[in-house]
Amino acid sequence: MESGPRSNCADPILPARARPPGSRASKRRAKFTPDGWHRSSWVCGVVAFGWIALAACRDTGEPNPGPDPLNLAVRVVVDSETFRSTGDFVLDLVPSDRHGTTYIEDNWQLSSTLSTPTSGSLATISSGVQPPYTQPVASAILIDDSGSMSGSDPDRQRAAAARRFWGDILGARAGNTVALLDFGRGDEVPTTGFEHTSLLAGFSTDGTALEEGLPQIRAVAGGGTPLYRSATEVIAWIDSTTPATFHRTLVVVTDGKPGDLPSKDSLFATAATAQVRIFVVGLGPAAQQTPVTAAVVLAQELANRTGGIYAAASSPADLENILQTLALSASPARLLLHLQLTPPAGTAAAVAGTVSISGERGSATASWSFVAP
């Protein structure tokens, strides 16, 4: 994670000026809309969460508590045909504070820099806010309850985070629905209809019904991490129990490297067919950034390949705020930065950089990356 510049109290940041009608940017936005890209054949996405410590100024020059630090999540949206032709892609940004409150529609200055490939150049085509999805949301929470979670989350803070997540999803609009499941219970018998998963609470619009499944979230000694097989059957279940007109997501909370790597491609194919995005929240080894672990790489790939979001929780105490931010990013208005890479990177080439956001609430910077389609 990278830090952005501190806010400058003596030199306030002004909102970016709107582009004039008929400009190149406005014409390009009329032709290519990221929402349309999202509905196309699958997009790539990976997210970095960067907590930025800010200081406000007093007359004494000493820092005071000031505004909450900003948290910036970024998802890369890439349409294969468009990127190969023009090098265009979009960064989908979610600025929020430490309480999980998002600030999509504030006046922000946005900028991005390219680190890879070094021979390319990056241009900003446009930026702005896209209205929220109009369809209801169906989100399933899949919790890792393998034995290692007794060390990664000994106080079961993942249960409280799940409650916060569905509280925000269900409260956002009538008709939204959430389910609660877990995996990694070892020799315990899975729920009928599943081979690697326990259904703790089926899809419901009632938080009380979901609450009944929370006591079952507990680490089970000896349980492994069949993440890919569990997620595959959960997505198939989502597809069979919720209408395709819903905006459907799967939120996975895990601390380890999946033990069923041969099942990875099957999961990606199932997610693409069902049009289910996967949000991954890493704990412990699945959150370690220095050095980056194999578990982190696989968690990022899981989000990347399904158009979802990856977030690293440096401690269990971060889970609740991260899950709240993910809930608020499931169907909100979207803050989009439309970029163009010249020349377009070749297939399978790594593309990476950073994005910065600045406004009255402060500044933040986060990394983004994807593999060129």
Image (spheres, helix red, strand yellow):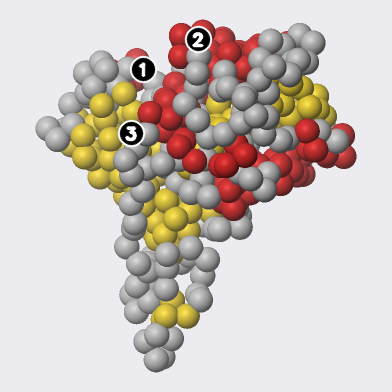
Instruction: Report which residue position mark 3 lands on.
Output: 369
Q: Residue at x 21, y 18 (%)?
A: 346
How many other residues sit within 10 Å of disc 1, few (<14), some (14-19) or many (≥20)? many
Q: How far apart are marks 2 and 3 (CA)?
A: 24 Å
How many other residues sit within 10 Å of disc 3, few (<14), some (14-19) or many (≥20)? many
Query: Circle 2 — which element?
Result: helix
Q: Residue at x 69, y 17 (%)?
A: 187
Q: Identify residue type, mark 1.
A: Ser
Instruction: Report which residue position mark 1 lands on.
Output: 80
Query: Circle 1 — which element?
Result: helix
Q: In this view, does 317 lie to the left or right of 139?
A: left
Q: Would you say residue 54 is visible in this rendering? A: yes
- Tell me which label, 3 or 1, sits earlier in the chain: 1
Q: Where is residue 103 in the image (x, y as percent from the top left)?
A: 55, 54
Q: Nearer the viewer, mark 3 or mark 1?
A: 3
Q: Against 201, is 129 above or below? A: below
Q: Would you say residue 92 is visible in this rendering? A: no
Q: Distance between the residues labelled 3 and 1?
A: 15 Å
Q: Identify residue type, mark 2.
A: Ser
- Tell me which label, 2 or 3, sits earlier in the chain: 2
Q: How far apart are marks 2 and 1 (CA)?
A: 24 Å
User: Mark number for residue 263?
Assistant: 2
